[in-house]
Image (tube, helix red, strand yellow):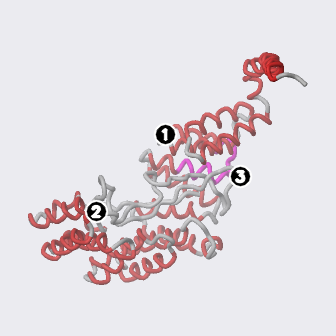
Amino acid sequence: MRSPSANAFLLLAALVLTLPACAARQDNGGEALLDPVNSARQEFVADVQMNSGRVLLAVEGYDKAMVARPGDAGLLLKKGQALLRLKRPETALEAFRLAQVASPKSAGAFYGAGQASERLGRTDEARRYFERAVTLAPDSWRARCHLGVLLMNQGKLDQAREQFLAALVLPQVMSASHEGGARETLLNNLAVAQVLSGDAEGAVATFRQAMRQARDPELSANNLGLLLVRLGHPNEALSAFRAAGNDARALNNLGYALLLKGEVARAQTLFEKALDLSPRYYETAGENLKQAVQGASGQAQDHAPAQAVQPSGSSAQHEREGIGMTGQAVQGESEPEVRRVSLSAQPGTGLRFGPVTLRDQGKMEVATGGM
C-alpha cells in the first residue's frame, strides 16, 4: 500500500504529463472552431449565456459557432436578437439582413429587421419588414401584434384593428393554456385602437375583457381607469385602478387623472387620502398634491400616477426577444419581446410616470409584439 506522499507524487506526475496535451488544444483553437461538433457546442453554450442574461458573451459564442457555419441563418437570427438586447440596432440589422440572404423565407429574419429598423426610427422600412414577416408567418400573433401597433402609430387604425382581430382568432391565442399573455395584450391594443377611432364605449368593453384574460391586469386596468375618467365615470374608474394595485395607488391615479381634467379640488382630496393610507406614496402623491394646491394642473405633466400605465415587456423590463415562428419557438431561441399599447407617455423617474394622455392630449406610447 502506497503512502500518502507517494500518491501525491503520482498525481502530480500525471498532471504534468497532461499539460502538453492541454497546451496543444489551446494552440489548436482555430482548427477546433472549424469542427461542426464544436460549433454546435459553442451555440449551445451561447444559448445558455443568452438565457442567463449574459448577452455579450452570447454574441461572442454565436460568432465562434459561425466560424464553422458562416452564413447560418439560425445563428444570425440569434446574434441579431442578442444585439437588440444590447441596444445595438444598427449591427443587429446587419445580422438580420444576412439571415434574409441565407434564408429568404425566414419570417424571423424579416421580423428582427423590422424591430431593428423601428428602433433606428425608420418606421416605413420597419413596416415593410413586419408586413413581410406576417406574409411568411400568418399565424404568428406577435408579428401581427407588432405590425398592428406600427400601423396604429401611422394613423392607419382600420388596418391596425384588422391585425389585432386576425391575431385574436388564431388557435394558439384562443387556447386557454396559451402562455405569454397573448390574448390580454391583443385585446388591450385593440381597445386603444378603438379609443383612437372614437369608439370609447366599445373600448371600455374590450378593456374589461382584456382584464379578465390577464394574469396581471395592471396595464389594461389602468388604461380602463383613464378612459372612464375621460367619460365622466370616476367611481367606476376608481374600481378599475384598484384592480391594478392597492387603494393608495388607486386614489393617487384617480386624483392625477382628475387633475389633468382641471378638477383640482377633487384631485387634492384624493392625493391627501393616498398620503394618509400609505407613506410610500409621499413623493408621488405629495408632488401631485403640491401641483394641485398651486392650481398648476398643466404643470402636473411631470408627475403621473405611480405605476399608472407602465408599458409591460419593454426593454426596461423583462425584454426577452427571440424568433418564435408560426406559434412555435425554434430550438434554442428565447421568447420574443411583447410590448403593449399604453395610454400614457414615457416613464419618468422613481415612482412617477409621464403624462397620462389620450389622443387629444398628447402622443401615445405604443407597444408591440415579437414573432
Q: Compare marks 1 and 2 and give the one earlier in the sequence.
A: 1
Please say if the residues under marks 1 and 2 sit with CB atoms less than 8 Å apart: no
- Residue 88 numbered tag: 1
Q: Nearer the viewer, mark 1 or mark 3?
A: 3
Q: Nearer the viewer, mark 2 or mark 3?
A: 2
* Closest to the observer, 78 or 90: 78
- Residue 361 locus on image (x, y percent): 25, 66
Q: Amino acid at mark 1?
A: Arg
Please say if the residues under marks 1 and 3 sit with CB atoms less than 8 Å apart: no
Q: Relative to residue 278, is residue 29 drawn left or right?
A: right
- Residue 180 locus on image (x, y percent): 57, 65
Residue drawn at (28%, 70%) of the image: 253
- Residue 35 locus on image (x, y percent): 79, 31
Read off the magenta span.
100-114
Residue drawn at (56%, 62%) of the image: 142
On whether residue 102 falls in the magenta region, the answer is yes
Q: Compare marks 1 and 3 and give the one earlier in the sequence.
A: 1
Q: Secondary structure at mark 3?
A: loop
Is residue 196 visible to us here?
no
- For the C terminus, give its image quadrant: bottom right
- For the N terminus, give its image quadrant: top right
Q: Which residue is mark 3?
A: 331
The alpha-carbon separation of the residues under discs 1 and 3 comes to 24 Å
- Number of numbered labels in the structure image: 3
Q: Compare marks 2 and 3 and give the one earlier in the sequence.
A: 2
Q: Secondary structure at mark 1?
A: loop
Query: What main secondary structure does the magenta stretch of the protein show?
Result: helix
Q: Which residue is mark 2?
A: 280
